Image: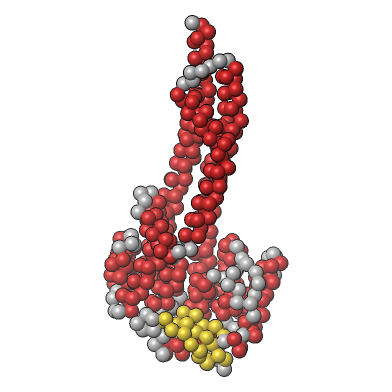
Amino acid sequence: MAAYDYKALTADGRRTSGVISADNPRSARRELRARQLTPVEVEESGQSKSRGARLRGRLSHKQRTLFTRQMAVLLQSGMTVEQALTAAAADGSAASVKALILGVRAQVMEGVTLADSFRSAPSAFPALYRSVVSAGESSGKLPAVLDQLATNLERTYKMASTARAALVYPAVLGVMALLMVTALMVFVVPKLVEQFAMLGTTELPLLTQIVIGASDFARSWGWLLALCVFAGVALFSQAMKSPTFRKSLDAFLLGLPLIGPLIQTLSAAQFARVHATLAGSGATVIEALSAARGAMSNAVFRDAATAIIEQVQQGGTLSSAMRATKVFPPLLTHMVQSGEAARDVPAMMNRAADFLESEFEATTRTLLSLLEPVIILILGGIVGTIVLSIMLPIMQLNTLALG
């Protein structure tokens, strides 16, 4: 038997840790559940970790998605985990990815479970990913769980790729606009001022005076403005490390007119998808809720998930606990309530996640399509203002000459 360090939740939601002896991590988790503890993390103690050496390497989201899909297909075809890992490593992967997969395979062949072998490569396989795989192994439904996980990763990758592709043109347009305005203010406007001075123009139109003042400020204090921007970014990055500031910012973003509903929809979809995946693969309600909480990037939703766990542990229903937080969309809470009545919460969670993700994609696509003309209008307005400020003195001189 080996010694395992564990972190778990007690029946009243408190965290506890210790060491337990078992033949393998799965047996350790089974023993913890027998003790009325919900396992959160189980790994070999320092004395017996020779088989679980740290694996180096990272996987991009695309590489992780492809690997998960390959494993799902290979396992569903009847291969063992070792055979599937061998085939996945030999499938023309990059050298670093191949070495990582072979390292995982070596640990699996020594008796380590797939989830625990992933634990030795945390940069490649996040905690949520490992939790889903562990639940699939515990329930004996690993191929089906990996298939569902691959589908979720593919959906997430598609959403991210669509957003990035839609943002490329507006981003390039915005950068070009900034460079163009900077060039006009720093190089073109000062030359025209010299020409106006040579022509003896004293009374310049107000608009021209404002533009010349802005140009003088950019030339004289532009470095200070850039320094302030960099300092502001650094201070903001530092402040984001504070949980209090992060929670306040997340609450503020949720209250914004357009951004708030988008964040709420995406966070609710993530919560529903993760919970449905784990609950459907055999995890307990508390394990599924804990994993869903870990997937939340928004502090407000993370606190809401904590409150849900506490209420469920006290005997409350999942739908009533979600409704009490007042952060989840009514659609999701109603569908969870229907799932509880039909004794199939994971299926209703998946349906709700499908709808919420579709709504998020449609809204995002609409907003991004409106972003391009907005940038063009702003750019046209700024450039038009500068051109008009240049033309007004010229027109004034022509009027005086004709007069």
At x 60%, y 17%, the residue is 198
Give the mark count: 0
Position in image of residue 394 (x %, y %): 53, 17
Vertical arrangement, residue 74 with respect to residue 391, above or below? below
Whether residue 354 sits left or right of residue 89 in the image: it is left
Viewer-proximal residue among 218 and 252? 218
Viewer-proximal residue among 135 and 189? 189
* Residue 403 can be seen in this image: yes
Whether residue 183 sits left or right of residue 35 in the image: it is right
At x 49%, y 24%, the residue is 208
* Residue 384 can be seen in this image: no
At x 46%, y 67%, the residue is 295
Position in image of residue 364 (x %, y %): 44, 50
Vertical arrangement, residue 160 with respect to residue 187, above or below? below
- The quadrant in which residue 109 appears is bottom right
- The quadrant in which residue 301 appears is bottom left
Pick out the residue farthest to the right.
Answer: 95
* Position of the N terminus by quadrant: bottom right
Position in image of residue 49 (x %, y %): 61, 85
Position in image of residue 203 (x %, y %): 48, 18
At x 61%, y 25%, the residue is 191
Query: What colour scheme governs how the chains and residues are painted in the rendered image of this protein?
Result: secondary structure
Vertical arrangement, residue 157 with respect to residue 112, above or below? above
Viewer-proximal residue among 189 and 66? 189
Pick out the residue farthest to the bottom.
Answer: 1
